[in-house]
Image (cartoon, rainbow, N blue to C red):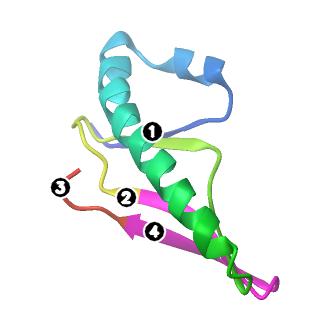
Amino acid sequence: MADKIYEFRNVTDILELTDEQFERFLEDFKIWFKFQKEARKKLAYLNKLGFVNVRLSDVIRWNDDHQTGITRFNGEVNINNHEVYEVIINKSGA
């Protein structure tokens, strides 16, 4: 079965998952939650420097790869308020 990427903008969007998918999602969500809390704190400091603005997405995009663990996080970088780049943060050993 091929991987499917789900996008959760609202809490009720999670209801489209099967019970089995939800169990996998919960394990991945724990990793996502911890990463987001740590990264947002560090990015707030970096953004105070002024010339670069790094923002993580407020939407959860979950790749149902039938495994537990997250190795990538998406975000955006705005340099000098002109250009926005999508960045992928690879995290090994999730």
- The span from disc 4 to disc 3 (Cα, nearest Å) is 16 Å
Q: Which residue carries the number 4 mark?
A: 88
**Numbered tag placed on residue 33 in the rendering:** 1
Sequence-wise, the earlier of marks 4 and 3 is 4
Image check: 40 left or right of 84?
Answer: left
Q: For the residue carrying disc 1, how many other residues have a C-alpha within 10 Å: few (<14), some (14-19), or many (20+)?
A: few
For label 4, the SS is strand
Tell me if residue 46 comes above or below residue 9 in the rendering: below
> Does residue 4 show up?
no
Q: Which residue carries the number 3 mark?
A: 93
Residue at 21% x, 37% y: name it: 67
Marks 2/4 in contact by CB < 8 Å: the verdict is: yes
Three-letter code, disc 4: Ile
Marks 1/4 in contact by CB < 8 Å: the verdict is: no
> Residue 44's quadrant in the figure?
bottom right
- The span from disc 1 to disc 3 (Cα, nearest Å) is 16 Å
Q: Position of residue 93 (x, y in %)?
A: 17, 55
Q: Which residue carries the number 2 mark?
A: 72
Task: Tell us which disc is closer to us: 1 or 4.
Answer: 1
Image check: 16 left or right of 35?
Answer: right
For label 3, the SS is loop
Q: Position of residue 80 (x, y in %)?
A: 78, 88
Tell me if residue 13 comes above or below residue 15 in the rendering: below
